[in-house]
Structures are given as C-alpha cells and as structure tokens.
Image (cartoon, rainbow, N blue to C red):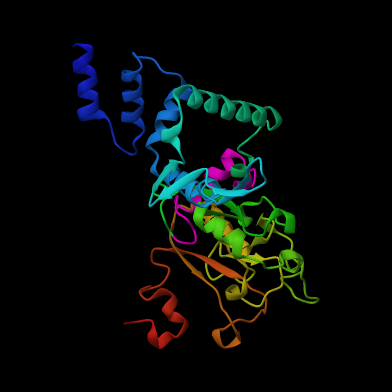
C-alpha cells in the first residue's frame, strides 16, 4: 500500500467528522512539507473557528474599529484645527485614510512604528489577553470543561451552540460581590450575553451573597441533620426519614427559602448537581432501580409540610406498584390515569 492510498483511504472512509479538527490538521501538515508545530496547527484551527472569528468581528466593530474610525482634530503649525480620521468605514470595509498617498518606504516605516508600540506593550504586559481571562474568571481548564459539558456546550441564556459562538464561563454572583468558584456559581454564556450581563446588570449582589447564610430558628432543615450523604456549598443530600422507597433521598438547599420556585440560580445548579450525584450513587448501589420520581411540594395546598425547600429523589423498581402509569400525576389520584 502506498502512502497516498493509505492517507486517501483514511480521509475518505475512516476519518470521522465530529468537528473540523482532523482535516484541518492534515491540511496544515500537507501544506508545511509534512511537519508542523503545535502552535502552527493551533493557528490553523483558530483560522477555521467561526465562533472565534465572530468574537473578533464583534471586537472589530465595537472596540478597535469604533476607536479608529472616530473623528479627531489635529493642529497645524499656526494652531488651526483640522478634522481627520485614522480609518474610514464603508459598510463592513475598513480603509486606512489616505493610504494611496503613502510611499512604500513610508508604509514600511509605519509598520515598524506599530511593531515598536506592540513590543513595548508586550514588555509591560506579560499577559496581553488578561481581558479574555477575566471574562472566564480565571477558571481552570478542568472546571471550565465541566461547566461547558453540563451546559451541553450551549449558552445557558440564549441556547446558541459553542460551534456558532464562543462560550465563556461566567460567575453568576461575581467574585467581587462574594461569589465563589464553586460549580453551582458558574454558568456557560456566549460572549455576547456575558458582555450584555456585565454592561446592563447593576444589581447590588452583596445582599444576595449574604442571603445564602439565612437560617430560621426551629426549622428542621435549617439545622442540617446528621447523616449527610453528599454536601455542596449551597445544598446537601440526606436520606429521607420516611422513605417512599428504599434509598429515597432529599436534596435540601442550605438557605432558608420556602420552596424550589424561590431558589437563586446557583442554588438550582447545586440541587441539580446533587440530584445527578445521588442518582448515580443509587444506581451503583442497587441494580434493581429502573427509574426515578423527582418532585417537590411548593406550598401547603400542594402537600408541603416543612416550609423549607426540598426536592425528593425517589428510586423506582419494576413491579413496586401494580400500574405506575401517570407517575407524578398521582398527586391527585383521580388524575393519575388518562
């Protein structure tokens, strides 16, 4: 088998297109005489990444392009002011003002001046991309992956895919307002929604951060009982004292809050996380579990007996009732069958 037949066979029949990465890497290797550095391959992938390209289109339009196309004034030797622009814009096309009047040696000299400014800036700033890191909150790669995976690589506000728009990890309650790096306080936002959240959200989060410490005297769930199965910063999981089925679990937010519908988003994240953790633990412990009921009672008329939010995770097993059809609809028995 020749190298060509091996490679063409792999590309046409074996290579799986889960993303653009494999063919782009192979093209870069072919273009560079068979070898390319990691950085060269990464640059080729970046060049094909539409989500990153859209991000920098946003930067061009709303940041650097907006600055360079501003009308300015300069004074001549006599002190008279003359308006000018560094860059002109026509629709989506940017043009260096007066470029056709520049001689080749002047262009080269201007390039050198720009390079000098860039080098001086990089000497002062060891990390010129810190503004991008701030948007993701200095989150480690592993935790960032966990947040994006939990969001199924989509913006948790608008739902757009990471393939279409770059995603950032956002602190729901900002760090400077007391927010932590716990997974329950992190969410995946596209760069547009993250920027909009920063620009428009003027909520004073200090009271919200303090509210997480709210407890009510004599509340049986505020005084976290012994036998905690799993604990997170904002919620705990315990075994139900009056289980409907074996391994029935309660997920309880630590803050005293009346019901699930009044939870802050970080608390909902913490609750969802514990539901997943306990589901997996129950399935590992008892192979007869074949389903779950997940529910909460919100209000006395809905059957709530403890005025502190809690979520039931009830394992179900084949044959545990004669006819399980209707499930949660059984809270009103006459409506369970339909």
- Residue 46 visible from this viewpoint: no
The quarter of the rendered structure image containing the N terminus is top left
Q: Which of 123/203 is in front?
A: 123
Q: Residue sitting at 66 percent across and 43 percent down?
A: 78
152 left or right of 184 in image = left
Q: Position of residue 202 (x, y in %)?
A: 66, 66
Q: Which residues are magenta?
A: 134-158
- Residue 195 visible from this viewpoint: yes
Tag count: 0
Q: Residue furthest top?
A: 2
Q: Position of residue 337 (x, y in %)?
A: 34, 82
Q: Residue furthest right?
A: 217
Q: Which of 319/134 is in front?
A: 134
Q: Does the magenta-highlighted stretch encompass residue 143?
A: yes
The image shows residue 338, relative to residue 208, as above or below, that is: below
The quarter of the rendered structure image containing the C terminus is bottom left
The image shows residue 73, relative to residue 217, as above or below, that is: above
95 left or right of 207 in image = left
Q: Which of 44/318 is in front?
A: 44
Q: Does the magenta-highlighted stretch encompass residue 300?
A: no
Q: Residue sitting at 48 percent across and 50 percent down?
A: 61
Q: Quadrant of residue 141?
A: top right
Q: Position of residue 172 (x, y in %)?
A: 62, 59
102 left or right of 78 in image = left
Q: Which of 228/174 is in front?
A: 174
Q: Position of residue 57 (x, y in %)?
A: 45, 46
């Amino acid at each position: 088998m020749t190298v060509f037949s091996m490679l063409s066979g792999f590309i046409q029949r074996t290579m799986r297109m889960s993303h653009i990465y494999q063919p782009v890497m192979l093209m870069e290797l072919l273009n560079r005489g068979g070898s390319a550095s990691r950085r060269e391959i990464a640059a080729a992938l970046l060049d094909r990444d539409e989500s990153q390209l859209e991000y920098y289109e946003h930067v061009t339009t709303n940041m650097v392009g907006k600055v360079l196309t501003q009308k300015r004034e300069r004074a001549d030797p006599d002190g008279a002011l003359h308006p000018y622009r560094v860059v002109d814009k026509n629709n989506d096309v940017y043009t260096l003002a007066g470029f056709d009047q520049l001689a080749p040696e002047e262009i080269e000299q201007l390039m050198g001046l720009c390079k000098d400014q860039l080098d001086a800036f990089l000497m002062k700033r060891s990390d010129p991309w810190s503004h991008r890191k701030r948007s993701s909150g200095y989150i480690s790669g592993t935790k960032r992956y966990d947040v994006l995976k939990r969001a199924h690589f989509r913006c948790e506000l608008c739902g757009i895919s990471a393939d279409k728009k770059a995603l950032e990890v956002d602190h729901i309650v900002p760090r400077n307002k007391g927010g932590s790096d716990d997974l329950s306080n992190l969410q995946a936002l596209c760069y547009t929604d993250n920027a909009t959240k920063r620009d428009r959200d003027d909520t004073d989060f200090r009271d919200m951060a303090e509210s997480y410490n709210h407890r009510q005297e004599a509340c049986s769930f505020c005084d976290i009982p012994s036998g905690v199965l799993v604990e997170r910063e904002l919620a705990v999981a315990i075994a139900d004292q009056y289980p409907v089925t074996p391994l029935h679990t309660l997920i309880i937010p630590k803050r005293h809050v009346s019901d699930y519908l009044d939870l802050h988003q970080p608390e909902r994240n913490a609750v969802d996380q514990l539901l997943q953790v306990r589901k997996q633990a129950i399935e590992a412990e008892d192979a007869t579990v074949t389903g779950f009921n997940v529910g909460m009672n919100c209000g006395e008329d809905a059957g709530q007996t403890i005025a502190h939010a809690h979520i039931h995770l009830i394992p179900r097993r084949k044959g545990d009732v004669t006819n399980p059809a209707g499930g949660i609809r059984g809270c009103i028995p006459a409506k369970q069958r339909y």
